[in-house]
Image: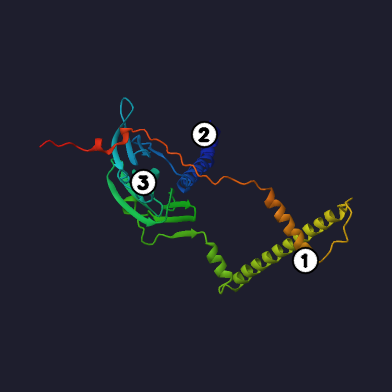
Amino acid sequence: MRKRIFNLAMLCCFVLPCVLSAQEQTSTMQAASYDPLIPQMFAVDSETQTIAVINKNENKIEILNRTADGYKKAHILLADQMEGRHDVYAIYRPQSIAIYENHIVYLASNRDSSFVRILTLDGVLKQEHRFGGAANAFSYDVKAKMLYLAGDNATGYNIFAIDVKDGFEHINVANSPSFQYVKPRKADEIQKHDPFGAGLAMIAMGTVFIVLIVITLVMMGFSGSLKAIRERKSANKSPIHTDKPTNTNVSDNGEELAAIAAALYMYNEELHDEEATILTINKVAKVYSPWSSKMYNMNNYKR
């Protein structure tokens, strides 16, 4: 009996420290874990069963409380006014929401800037911080007490880190580290490698001259081809043979040619018939029609 008690005591002395250390390691790992940088549309508080929801259709934050029948809307908060606005790019829209240490944290952003709002579970606004750059996700590092925000757009990405060591009601953004990456423009890259533009000018002028030379060579080759084709066709044509005898005894005397021309003219004049020089003029009678008479368009005034 004494041996069993002794063995049990020894087992407790060795096993209990191992179990406690494992629990400590598990709690440390849980405390060191943080949420991934992924936008969240819903957040739940396990103690109070409070649910925070992003309503993108109405640009609102809705807080739901647990009831006997289910859930009901306890608070509705407007992120930014949307109706009647034409500057759509400047409207702040909710991007992500979470519940940390009995506080609702949600992030909203537009094209150029963002803000973070800290609320109680009852929807009371405690803090609001705005900063430049678009962000769409955040996460909380429990061990480091840091709230990380990140976002990307067509020109780059932004990263912010906010100190939460004094609690979510007293967050400090004065010395928060941040990083903003903007994709360099093509003009900036060219200016970096060619500050005076000499290389760009040479490339442009060289391209123009090369294109002109190529066009000239193509036109010369095209014209040469057309000329060769034309000569080949003319060489393949057979000479025209006529059976009519050629009169080589035509006199070159101008007087004889003039006499022949005068004789032909007089002969043609004699063949022309004489025409009667009587002119006839036919008078056409016009039937009277009052349909277009202007007198019917006049107003008759009786005196």
Q: Amino acid at mark 2?
A: Ile
Tag 1: residue type? Glu
Q: Secondary structure at mark 1?
A: helix
In the image, residue 269 above or below residue 203: above
Q: CA distance from mark 2 to mark 1?
A: 165 Å
- Which numbered marker is on residue 105? 3
Amino acid type at circle 3 is Val
Instruction: Indicate how the structure is coloured in the image.
Output: rainbow
Q: Residue at 74% across / 57% down in the picture?
A: 263
Q: Secondary structure at mark 2?
A: helix
Residue 171: quadrant of the picture: bottom left
- Report which residue position mark 1 lands on: 255
The mark that comes first in sequence, 1 or 3, is: 3
Question: What residue is pinned by disc 2?
Answer: 5
Q: What SS does tag 3 mark?
A: strand
For disc 2, the neighbor class at 10 Å (few under 14, some 14 to 19, many from 20) is few
The alpha-carbon separation of the residues under discs 2 and 3 comes to 55 Å
Please determine whether, in this image, residue 293 is positioned above or below residue 113: above
**Residue drawn where x is 55% and y is 62% of the image:** 186
In this image, 271 relative to 108: left or right?
Answer: right
